[in-house]
RNA sequence: GGGGGAUUAGCUCAGUUGGUUAGAGCGCAUGCAUGACACGCAUGAGGUCGGCAGUUCGAAUCUGCCAUCUCCCA
């Protein structure tokens, strides 16, 4: 074995081997429990980010752990066509060739986009393989696959027939860059520094009088149709029924009273621009006001804005209108103002509320979706996301599902040629085009991408095609076991998938009939949802392309290995908290792998492992009379670790899982057990016993670590000859009780007292080492110690003399009959020890050190004494707490006495 | 405006229902080429647990108020 672990060769070789042996294929096996996860489909044209690394490492850990437990595991991969994002990218690529989408025409463009996707798409899947993800790649699904598309269309048609889908003219979020409507969820509110303009609207009936109106969007003045006041606002009672003159493109406008007006904003007078504001639109409808659209789809002003402004870009128009108002003395003032402006999530431009005709979905099964989570059919980790989820469902708005794009699932609606489009009598809605197609024209729009991905757990398993469901194991794998995703798509995706599952799984249930408890349990798409944190840079900023603060995971893999990256990212991922990334942590992941490699290397150098194929055969190599307290203690710690890991997995506490494994491996096993074993391994007699114990520990350590660092553990599993060359993937670390039982069956009983004894010895060693280190004696420098103790502890010391000598770097331990004078001393759980030094002892600094310890101990003792004097503590606290305090007091008093003696000996 | 989260060592974070002397990793200091590992070993320094009040025999932990940061929704 090489001195340092080099992951590159190992990782590629093993991954190819796993693929070849079809280790990841999800088989329908009724003799086993199923375990399934569907991947949150990444954008097909995307590349791997740190967020993907975190998210997919967690899924891989769950999948590998389930495989070890003997379940039949399906981790189903795939990609999302990402309508707007992909179309934008393809259009940009076309633009470089000087072509536009319109020039190509719809059919040509789609062909072009599909080619582009096939060329650039799927890179991310290869990257996931580099990370070690154990997806069933043969099952890879893309949302624009034929069968998936049929499912999307089928869902639309079903929802339409069930009365959930409607077409209507509504105020929507319009993206002037993408030229499409967006759902509320795709709009991001951002605080903007702008100006609040106060504009003068002259009152027609009272010459010279005017009202002051505040607005942040003066360019919409040309679309004003009225002013509105609150009916109970005393300031404006006399205005009711009067008219004002529109300050630009002058026109008489009525003043209406409406309760929706915010009295405390500005002067309490609101200008009404119904075509370009949601609230204004509502008010206009109530008062029967006209609706004047002044914007084109691309955000420029149209002919209704008047010939002066027609064709002007919206923000340019704003500047000019402000200038004109000012020149005419109609601008009272403009003050700096910060307000929230909605931005298009994808195009990052301010959206415009715009009146347009779109397809909407009334969400199905909202009530059941709440119950599914409230009643525990679906559990969220961390639990607090339930609140966010329920709050959204309480305030849910209909979903605008049509998009003015070409790349996506075209809406399966045809309009009768020559008929009025808004009349449903002229619609044909169906999975297949109408037979007399020449009389019909299909809707131009496509569906929101999320209106396809909300079917993900259903459609990837074959729904709604019954034959496909059979072969893909729908009944076996659905509901899926866990979903791992970011909280940022809890509304976009998680909540919608739940509603889709409730509506579509199983037989149709009429709209007004609620699902039963049992039906909900069967229909939910997953049972547990784990929300990861969001990865930030070391300054706490979100990672983004524009900031350039996002490291390339592939570079990190090249530098530290996939295992190192996985270990590093998992060690900094606290449950549901945002994560501050730093490359140092990945470096630590690599260091961990190297440590693991080297301890196995050391094991190998101590002799080729004999039969390590099964744990019972390893146990046969143990001579029970050679078992030491250290052997017992490490096995007990191993059992504890197995139990802790089991418990922490249940709670999705991944970084705690890793932490307890880390601590057992590094501190208990490497720093202590291996070190204490070294003298035993050189004397030959009980070497085999000791190596067998090491093999048991290493075997379990590899098994425990395998979900986190799959490559190196598999490699070392082979090196040390576990399981006769079978992959580590099929073996479970088991529970602590399993280990204890196996040992018991072979006649090995572990004494729980050994744990305490070993920890006392460890404390002793630390004290002895410190005594040396205080005077800069290197830890390998051989020294001698005197000690004074009681007969029982003396027996312990003699019993493990060899390991104490090795661990402390000593050549002798000599019993003293009286306190040796003038020697540096320490008080340990096994007695007082004195460093035997003929020269060079700095008595003064030694006294200082011991004095400090006396002060500390006296403080502790005072605290405990005060507590025990307090009668209410003694009366009310549980007995074991009081006894604990008493024991603590006597221990510390004893220690204090010995230190004082040592101090006197230094006179 | 409504809601969530955070505040513990220089940094990043643990601390499960209140109960021995608050932990880890990194960093720092000192020593060490020791026959697994310098991607390592050993030892050590470093914290009035954001502030104030309250509940309790006992508060990092529970309650209230305040401060700062952050996210989501309107």
Image (tube, rainbow, N blue to C red):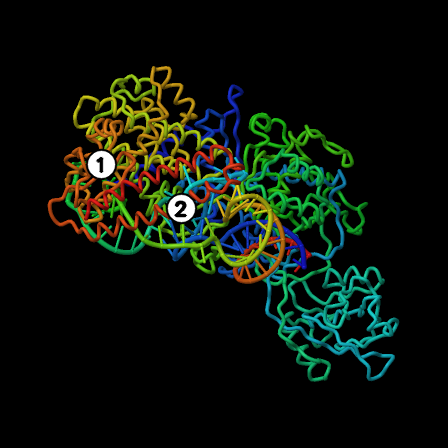
Front residue of this view, candidates A567 and A817: A817
Chain that bears disc 1: A
Quadrant position of residue A172: bottom right
Dot 1 crowding, Cα within 10 Å, few <14, some 14–19, many 20+: many
Q: Is residue B68 above or below residue A267?
A: above
Where in the figure is residue A827, as x and y percent of width and height?
Answer: 27, 40
Q: Is residue A617 left or right of residue A314?
A: left
Chain that bears disc 2: A
Can you identify the residue that label 1 sits on? A807
Front residue of this view, candidates A711 and A308: A711
Can you identify the residue that label 2 sits on? A862
Mark 2 and mark 1 on one chain? yes
Query: Who comes first in sequence, dot 2 or dot 1?
Result: 1
Where in the figure is residue A154, as x and y percent of width and height?
Answer: 67, 37
Q: Secondary structure at mark 1?
A: helix
Q: Secondary structure at mark 2?
A: helix
């Amino acid at each position: 074995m090489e001195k340092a672990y080099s992951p590159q060769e190992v990782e590629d070789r093993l991954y190819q081997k796993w693929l070849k042996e079809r280790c990841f294929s999800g088989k329908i096996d009724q003799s086993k429990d199923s375990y399934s996860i569907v991947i949150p489909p990444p954008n097909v044209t995307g590349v791997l980010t740190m967020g993907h690394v975190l998210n997919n490492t967690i899924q891989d850990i769950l999948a590998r752990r389930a495989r070890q437990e003997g379940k039949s595991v399906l981790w189903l991969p795939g990609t999302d066509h990402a309508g707007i994002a992909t179309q934008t990218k393809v259009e940009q690529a076309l633009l470089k060739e000087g072509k536009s989408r319109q020039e190509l025409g719809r059919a040509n463009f789609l062909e072009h986009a599909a080619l582009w996707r096939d060329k650039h798409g799927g890179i991310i899947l290869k990257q996931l393989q580099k990370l070690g993800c154990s997806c069933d790649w043969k099952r890879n699904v893309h949302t624009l696959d034929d069968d998936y598309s049929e499912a999307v269309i089928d869902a639309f048609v079903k929802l339409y027939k069930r009365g959930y889908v409607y077409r209507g003219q509504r105020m929507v979020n319009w993206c002037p860059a993408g030229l499409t409507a967006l759902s509320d969820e795709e709009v991001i509110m951002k605080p903007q520094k702008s100006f609040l303009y106060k504009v003068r609207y002259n009152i027609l009936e009272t010459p010279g009088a005017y009202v002051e109106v505040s607005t942040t969007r003066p360019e919409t003045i040309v679309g004003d149709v009225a002013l509105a006041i609150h009916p109970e606002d005393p300031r404006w009672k006399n205005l009711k029924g009067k008219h004002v003159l529109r300050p630009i493109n002058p026109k008489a406008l009525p003043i209406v009273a409406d309760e929706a007006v915010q009295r405390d904003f500005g002067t309490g007078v609101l200008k009404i621009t119904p075509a370009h504001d949601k609230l204004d639109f509502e008010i206009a409808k109530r008062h029967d006001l006209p609706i004047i659209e002044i914007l084109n789809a691309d955000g420029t002003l149209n002919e209704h804005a008047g010939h002066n402004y027609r064709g002007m870009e919206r923000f340019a128009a704003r500047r000019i209108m402000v200038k004109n108002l000012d020149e005419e003395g109609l601008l009272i003032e403009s003050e700096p103002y910060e307000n929230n402006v909605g931005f298009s999530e994808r195009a990052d431009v301010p959206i415009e509320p715009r009146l347009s005709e779109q397809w909407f979905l009334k969400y199905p099964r909202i009530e059941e979706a709440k119950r599914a989570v409230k009643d525990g059919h679906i559990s969220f980790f961390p639990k607090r996301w339930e609140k966010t989820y329920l709050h959204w469902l309480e305030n849910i708005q209909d979903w605008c599902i049509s998009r003015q794009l070409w790349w996506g699932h075209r809406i399966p609606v045809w309009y009768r040629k020559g008929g009025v489009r808004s009349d449903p009598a002229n619609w044909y809605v169906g999975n297949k085009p109408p037979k007399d197609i020449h009389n019909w024209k299909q809707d131009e729009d496509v569906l929101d991408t999320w209106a396809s991905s909300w079917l993900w757990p259903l459609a990837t398993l074959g729904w709604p095609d019954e034959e496909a469901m059979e072969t893909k194991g729908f009944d076996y794998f659905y509901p899926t076991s866990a979903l791992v995703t970011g909280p940022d798509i809890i509304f976009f995706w998680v909540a919608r998938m739940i509603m889709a599952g409730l509506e579509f799984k199983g037989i149709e249930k009429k709209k007004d009939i609620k699902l039963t408890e049992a039906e909900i349990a069967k229909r939910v798409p997953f049972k547990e949802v784990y929300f990861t944190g969001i990865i930030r840079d070391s300054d706490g900023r979100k990672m983004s392309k524009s900031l350039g603060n996002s490291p390339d995971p592939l570079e990190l893999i090249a530098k530290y290995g996939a295992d190192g990256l996985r270990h590093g990212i998992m060690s900094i991922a606290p449950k549901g908290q945002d994560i501050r990334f730093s490359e140092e942590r990945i470096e630590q992941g690599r260091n961990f792998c190297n440590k693991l490699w080297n301890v196995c290397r050391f094991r190998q150098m101590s002799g080729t492992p004999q039969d390590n194929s099964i744990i019972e055969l390893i146990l046969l190599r143990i001579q029970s009379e050679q078992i030491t307290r250290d052997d017992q203690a490490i096995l007990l710690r191993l059992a504890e670790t197995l139990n802790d890991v089991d418990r922490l997995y249940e709670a999705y506490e991944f970084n705690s899982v890793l932490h307890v494994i880390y601590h057992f491996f590094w501190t208990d096993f490497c720093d202590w057990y291996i070190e204490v074993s070294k003298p035993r391994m050189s004397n030959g007699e009980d070497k085999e016993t000791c190596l067998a114990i090491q093999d048991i520990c290493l075997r379990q350590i590899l098994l425990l670590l395998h979900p986190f660092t799959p490559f190196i553990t598999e490699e070392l599993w082979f090196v040390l000859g576990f399981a006769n060359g079978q992959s580590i993937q099929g073996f479970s670390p088991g529970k602590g009780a399993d280990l204890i039982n196996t040992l018991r069956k072979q006649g090995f009983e572990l004494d729980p007292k050994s744990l305490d004894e070993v920890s006392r010895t460890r404390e002793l060693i630390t004290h002895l080492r410190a005594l040396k280190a205080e005077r800069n004696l290197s830890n390998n420098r051989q020294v001698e110690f005197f000690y004074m103790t009681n007969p029982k502890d003396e027996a312990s010391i003699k019993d493990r003399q060899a390991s104490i000598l090795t661990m402390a770097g000593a050549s002798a331990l000599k019993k003293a009959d009286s306190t040796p004078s003038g020697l540096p001393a320490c008080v340990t759980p096994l007695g007082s020890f004195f460093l035997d030094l003929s020269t060079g002892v700095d008595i003064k600094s030694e006294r200082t050190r011991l004095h400090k310890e006396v002060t500390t101990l006296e403080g502790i003792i005072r605290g405990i004494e005060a507590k025990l004097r307090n009668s209410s503590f003694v009366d009310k606290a549980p007995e074991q707490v009081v006894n604990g305090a008493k024991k603590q007091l006597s221990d510390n008093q004893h220690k204090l006495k010995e230190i004082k003696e040592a101090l006197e000996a230094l006179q």
